[in-house]
Image (cartoon, helix red, strand yellow):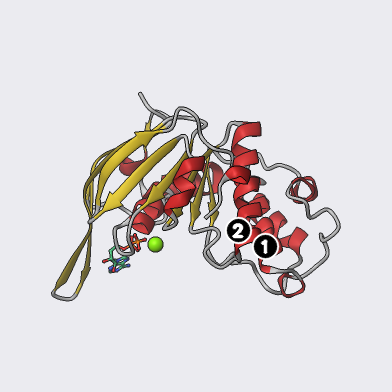
Amino acid sequence: MAFIEFHDVKKVYRSGEVRIEALRGMSFEVERGEICVIVGPSGAGKTTLLNILGGMDSLTEGRIILDGEDISAYSPRKLIGYRRRDVGFVFQFYNLIENLTALENVELASQICPAPLDAAETLRAVGLGERLGNFPSQLSGGEQQRVAIARALAKNPKLLLCDEPTGALDYNTGKQILQLLEDTSRKSGMTVLIITHNSALTAMADRVITVRSGQARDMRLNPHPTPISQIEW
Ligand SMILES: Nc1ncnc2c1ncn2[C@@H]1O[C@H](COP(=O)(O)OP(=O)(O)O)[C@@H](O)[C@H]1O
Ligand SMILES: [Mg+2]
């Protein structure tokens, strides 16, 4: 059994008369400790699949297994615990709380989960040891994304879900963020899923899933991933 399994997952959004099939029978697997890059055009269903895997949205049909647990059968109450305990999220626009310091942003997340890592320690690990007392507005985009990654990692989650984590960053800053995600996975064995529309990043992945029209159209393994430091685009 794989660490993550999607079995024929369907997601239909309804707004009034309109039915949007965001996922149309999506099936794939990811093994524990892998860096998995998910690519595909805008509207393909990438964010939808990540949100459902992260317990932020529900599926319409199908089954999702994570670490042997059928999370698609979870009650809303069980999903709350799952989101708090098992999943770290990193978004394109950081989503930090502007009137809390870097340290407080990380502490806030670790307070709602059972076995958090030390917030200051985690910020030091992402290179922000000197910036604990800064507010988001006093940090660059790349530094804010580091805070967001620390916030996700401080929960000590089972998996890290990243939706276009470099989408708002310039080339070099984006590369540093990807380096941090790569280091995190390689050092701690964390399973990391990264959504991107930059196909050059597929080279850094252990596994590449191509999503199109709500389906996983291709799943490819890279026996020798290229370190992000050696990828140019
Ligand atoms: N909350 C929602 N309500 C209605 N339609 C949605 C919602 N979220 C996403 N969609 C639709 O589902 C499809 C897939 O969207 P999304 O998963 O965001 O794609 P991607 O992240 O690959 O760009 C799109 O057609 C989008 O408009
Ligand atoms: Mg998206």
Point out residue 124 in the picture as x, y percentages from the top left corner: 80, 48
Q: In percent of the image, x 63 and y 66: which residue is there?
A: 96
User: Which label sits on residue 96?
Assistant: none
Q: CA distance from mark 2 to mark 1?
A: 7 Å
Query: Which one is in front, 105 or 202?
Result: 202
The reply to whether discs 2 and 1 touch (Cβ–Cβ < 8 Å) is: yes
Decide: is 91 above or below 137: above
Give the number of marks: 2
Point out residue 71 in the picture as x, y percentages from the top left corner: 37, 40
Ligand 1 falls in which quarter? bottom left
Q: Amino acid at mark 1?
A: Gly
Viewed as shown, does residue 99 lie left or right of 229?
A: right
Q: Residues within 10 Å of mark 2 (few under 14, many from 20)?
A: some
Q: In percent of the image, x 51 and y 41: which residue is there?
A: 204
- Which quarter of the figure has residue 145? bottom right
Rendered-image quadrant of the N terminus: top left
User: Which label sits on residue 142?
Assistant: 1
Decide: is 112 above or below 27: below
Viewed as shown, does residue 131 lie left or right of 88?
A: right
* In the image, farthest residue toward the left: 17
Point out residue 213 in the picture as x, y percentages from the top left corner: 22, 56
Q: Closer to the N terminus: mark 2 or mark 1?
A: 1
Point out residue 187 in the picture as x, y percentages from the top left corner: 66, 32
- Which quarter of the figure has residue 229? top right
* In the image, farthest residue toward the top: 1
Q: Amino acid at mark 2?
A: Gly
Viewed as shown, does residue 222 lie left or right of 18?
A: right
User: Which label sits on residue 174?
Assistant: 2
Viewed as shown, does residue 20 lie left or right of 72?
A: left
